[in-house]
Amino acid sequence: MIGIVGAGAFGTALGVALASESRDVVLWARDATQVADMASIRENKALPGVRLPPALHPAAALEDLSAAQVVLLTLPMQALHGFLDMYQSHFSHKILVACCKGIDLSALTGPSHVIARTCPSATPAVLTGPSFAADIARGLPTALTLACDDPQIGEMLQRALSTPALRLYRTTDVTGAELGGALKNVIAIACGVAIGAGLGESARAALMARGFAEMQRLALARGAQAETLMGLSGFGDLVLTCTSAQSRNFRHGLALGKGEAPPAATVEGVATAQAVARLAGQLGLEMPVTAQVAALVTGRQTVKNALESLLTRPLKEE
Ligand SMILES: NC(=O)C1=CN([C@@H]2O[C@H](COP(=O)(O)OP(=O)(O)OC[C@H]3O[C@@H](n4cnc5c(N)ncnc54)[C@H](O)[C@@H]3O)[C@@H](O)[C@H]2O)C=CC1
Ligand SMILES: O=C(CO)COP(=O)(O)O
């Protein structure tokens, strides 16, 4: 049996994909009414139009996860620390697969370190890569990265979480995998701003390429492998998120670029841009696109001035 914590769009989509292959899944949500609705109408409003298969069991009690050795954590990044800190006793000695994409704003670390700190007896792993919840739930082909320090546990997870449509590639580079997924959200906001402000497709491509250089700079400084960033979790997810209006990070930037109020949603790049800007300062790394996104999302910078400061930087080697 596989446990999933957080019945938003992504947790539900992964639950549907696994349960459609007759794997028993317990999907935990904090809202008892939402759980009762899912159990009765076999649909989750967070992922409308998708039927919940019989093998997916909605649950409101964390005790219902006790039989699951593997638990996927599909909460927003900034909620992870508080949640695990409060409920750590339910997760002792389990394999906890972080599916959230971001950097914790107070600890300035990714989800695997948050797990290690709050649940020291648990084994952390990371599932990340280019995938929209709606695509996974519809059974469309998707390829993701599964990262775990322990290669044997990584192999077990790869088998347990792959389906014919959901293809998992394995790595032991947990840092690279989680940073790829976190950092691309920041660049997706920048790309949304560029398109929203009418700067055109060439500007978007420039931001993606220079943003990718920043992603690699930070990831390598944190000990990640360059190949990981060039794979699904870095390059792959950067392309998807920066070019699709399905992305909430992209749409957030799009609204800022148009001078509109961004729609309410889980937009991981907002907090992560601020965390990464701080981290870059601590590590003495130049991350100009990230710095401008951090200033924009906190209202410290205007789109016009952000653009001007990027365009007036000294000319240099690529
Ligand atoms: N939606 C997508 O296409 C994808 C999302 N992800 C990642 O998955 C994570 C979750 O995203 P979504 O499911 O899309 O967000 P969402 O906004 O649809 O759902 C988040 C869920 O977490 C619950 N939640 C929030 N704080 C909580 C807390 N303190 N305790 C318990 N439950 C809490 C909310 O009630 C909600 O059900 C994010 O890090 C996102 O980057 C990754 C790949 C694809
Ligand atoms: O991570 C995602 C796609 O891989 C989902 O992107 P958003 O969180 O921007 O919607």
Image: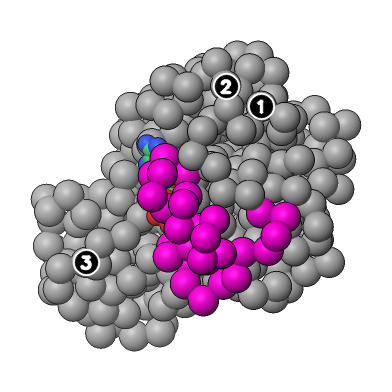
Residue 18 placement (x, y as % from top left): 73, 56
Please state the horizontal and vertical placement of residue 59, each as a whole percent of the image. 55, 42
Residue visible at 57% across and 49% down in the picture: 58
**Residue span colored magenta:** 29-56
Residue 90's label in the rendered image is 2
Give the residue drawn at x 31%, y 60%. Answer: 265
Location of residue 127 with respect to 184 vertically, above or below: above
- Secondary structure of the residue carrying tag 2 is helix
Q: Pointer 1: what residue?
A: 66
The answer to whether the residues at label 2 and label 1 have Cβ atoms under 8 Å apart is yes
As measured in the structure, the alpha-carbon distance from the residue carrying label 2 to the one carrying label 1 is 7 Å
Amino acid of disc 1? Ser
Q: CA distance from mark 3 to mark 2?
A: 36 Å
Q: Is residue 40 above or below residue 206?
A: above
Image location (x, y in percent) of residue 91 = 60, 23
The amino acid type found where label 2 is placed reads His
Q: Is residue 20 left or right of residue 179?
A: right
Viewer-nearest residue: 7 or 179: 7
The quadrant holding residue 103 is top left
Q: Earlier in the sequence, mark 3 or mark 2?
A: 2
What's the colour scheme? Answer: one colour
Amino acid type, callout 3: Pro
- Whether residue 260 appears in magenta in the rendering, the answer is no
Q: Answer yes or no: disc 2 within 8 Å of ligand 1.
A: no
